Amino acid sequence: MPETLLLILRTILPIFTIVGVGFLFSRITRLKLDPLIDIIIYITTPCLVFTSIINKEFVVREFWDITFGAFFVMLWGGLLIFLFSKIRGFDPRPFYLPIMFPNTGNMGLSVSLFAFGTGGLSKGVIYHIASCLLFYSLGVYLLSKEWGVKTTLKIPVIYVAIISIFLSIYRQPLLQFLKTHPLLFEFSRMGKRTIEMVAQPTIPLMLLMLGYRLSHTRVTSFRLPFFCALARIVMGLSLALIFVNLFKITGLNRAIIILVSSLSSPIASLMFAQKFNARPELAASTILISTLSMIITIPLVLAFLC
C-alpha cells in the first residue's frame, strides 16, 4: 500500500503542479504562450519521440500490442458513439473527437513517464503515434467529412517515428559500422546528445501549455459535458480492459494501454471543433471537466494497476 501511494503521488503531484503553474501564469501575466505550440509540435516532440525509440531495442510484439490496443479503443469508441447517435437521433460529429481520443500528448506522455519511468515513456510514445495517425486522418474525416490525409502528412512525429524505428531495428549493425569509423561515431554521439537536450523540455512545456489552455476554457453548461467527460474516461478504460484481457496483454504494455486509454479529452479536439464549427463550447467544457477529473481517476487507475 505505501508503494502504491508513493507511485500515485509521484505521478500526480508533478503533473498537476506544472499544469497549475501554466494556469496561474496565464492569469497573472499578459504574455502569450501560443508560439510555443509550434515549438512543441515541430521541434521538441519529434526529438522526444526519436530519443524514446532509439534508446531501446525495437520489439515488434511490443509495438503492435500497443498500436492495436490504441486502435481498438479509439475505433470501437467511435463505433459506439455512432450507434448511440442513431438510437437517440443526434448529430455525432461534435462528440467523436472529445470522446474517442484520449489526451496522449500532454497527459499521456507525462503520466507514462512519471508513473513508469523511461520504459513507460517509450511505450507511451507508441500509443501517442498511433493516436496521432488516427486523430489527424479518420478523426478529421468524421468531423469534417473531408479525408484528413493532408493533415496527417503535415505531422513531423510520423516521419520521425518511421526513421527512429528503422534505426532501432538496425541498431547493432549501425553501432558496429560507426565504431569502425571513429569520426562518424563521435559525430553521431554529439548529434544524439543534442537531440536529447532539445527533447528534455517537451513534457514540462506540454503541461504548462495544458494549464495555459485550461485557463482560457469556459464551461458553458455542465450536464452534457459531464456525461461526455464520463464517457471518455469510462468507455476508454472499459475498452482497454476488454482488449488486454481478450489478447492476453501483460506487464508494462498492459498498464500503459489501460492508463492512457482512460485519460481526458485532447486539447486538439477543441481546435478542430472551432475550425469546423462543431459545437466548440461542448468540446471546451468536456476537456476542462475531464482534465480536472484526472486528479481522481489517475490515482484510482494506478491503484487498480498495482
Image (tube, helix red, strand yellow):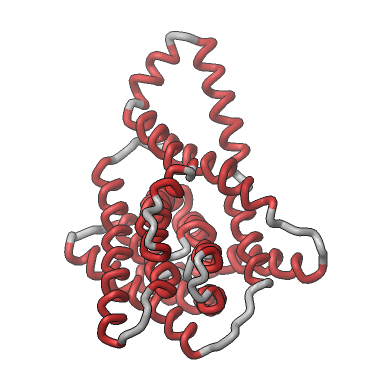
Q: Is residue 95 above or below residue 225?
A: above
Q: Residue at x 82, y 65 (%)?
A: 29
Percent position (x, y) of residue 235?
33, 75
Pick the residue in front: 67 or 30.
30
User: Left of 127 or right of it: where is 201?
Assistant: right
Q: Is residue 74 above or below residue 220?
A: above
Pick the residue in front: 158 or 59.
158
Percent position (x, y) of residue 240?
29, 67
Pick the residue in front: 238 or 268.
268
Quadrant into which the N terminus falls:
bottom left
User: Left of 126 or right of it: where is 86?
Assistant: left
Percent position (x, y) of residue 15?
58, 64
Pick the residue in front: 56 or 44.
44
The number of callouts visible is 0
Camera sees residue 89: yes
Camera sees residue 306: no
Percent position (x, y) of residue 191?
57, 26
Which quadrant of the view contains residue 141? Answer: bottom left
User: Left of 129 or right of it: where is 16?
Assistant: right
Quadrant into which the C terminus falls:
bottom left
Q: Residue at x 43, y 76 (%)?
A: 300
Q: Residue at x 47, y 9 (%)?
A: 181
Which quadrant of the view contains residue 20? Answer: bottom right
Which quadrant of the view contains residue 83? Answer: bottom left
Q: Is residue 173 above or below residue 266?
A: above
Q: Residue at x 45, y 79 (%)?
A: 229
